[in-house]
Amino acid sequence: MATHWTLGCDATDPHALAAFWAQALGYVSEPGYDEPDGASIVDPDGVGPAIGFLRVPEGKAAKNRVHLDLRVAGEPPWDSGERERLIRAKAEQLLSAGAIYVREQTYGGTFGHLVMLDPEGNEFCVA
């Protein structure tokens, strides 16, 4: 049996960062969790892990050692044109929500994924 787990994240503004990631992932605020220095989001279907955000005094200092890959195109096999369209559409939504575009990753000249930053500068990929 798998162990249930929560992803813990440090944040300057935990409520704003939780709101960004809730929108990005289709998550909702965790019912009953109401802390001024923390926020928690959960999968409304109860499948994915919870993600907690806690206020810390220090800012982000280096590249993430762990990051999220948003797999908006689903699982292979893919129609490459449709996959790229889905990735770029999600990236546009995330830009509107406060994300920052970093770069496009290609593999052998073929589109792979987009690298982005969340509103606090944490790297993530849209694939």
Image: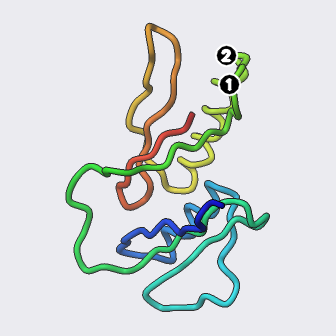
Q: Quadrant of the N terminus?
A: bottom right
Q: Position of residue 75 (x, y in %)?
A: 70, 31
Q: Is residue 48 above or below residue 107?
A: below
Q: Position of residue 115 (x, y in %)?
A: 43, 37
Relative side of 39 to 41, left or right:
left
What's under tag 1, amino acid-wise? Answer: Arg
Q: Is residue 49 above or below residue 12?
A: above
Label 2: how many residues lie within 10 Å, few (<14), some (14-19) or many (20+)? some
Relative side of 107 to 71, left or right:
left
**Residue shown at 66% from the left, 79% from the top:** 30
Furthest residue in direction top, as rendered: 108
**Residue shown at 56% from the left, 77% from the top:** 40
Furthest residue in direction right, as rendered: 45
Do residues under tags 1 and 2 come within 8 Å of each other at their CB atoms? yes
Label 1: how many residues lie within 10 Å, few (<14), some (14-19) or many (20+)? many
**Residue shown at 40% from the left, 31% from the top:** 103
Relative side of 84 to 126, left or right:
right
Give the labeled residue for mark 2. Answer: 80
Give the labeled residue for mark 1. Answer: 83
Q: 98 or 4, which lies in front?
A: 4
Q: Quadrant of the C terminus?
A: top right
Q: Position of residue 109 (x, y in %)?
A: 46, 8
Q: Position of residue 9 (x, y in %)?
A: 41, 68
Q: Quadrant of residue 85?
A: top right
Q: Could you give the CA–CA distance between mark 1 and mark 2, rounded to whole angstroms?
A: 5 Å
Q: 53 or 36, which lies in front?
A: 53
**Residue shown at 45% from the left, 15% from the top:** 107
Of helix, strand and loop, which one carries label 1? helix
Furthest residue in direction front, as rendered: 1
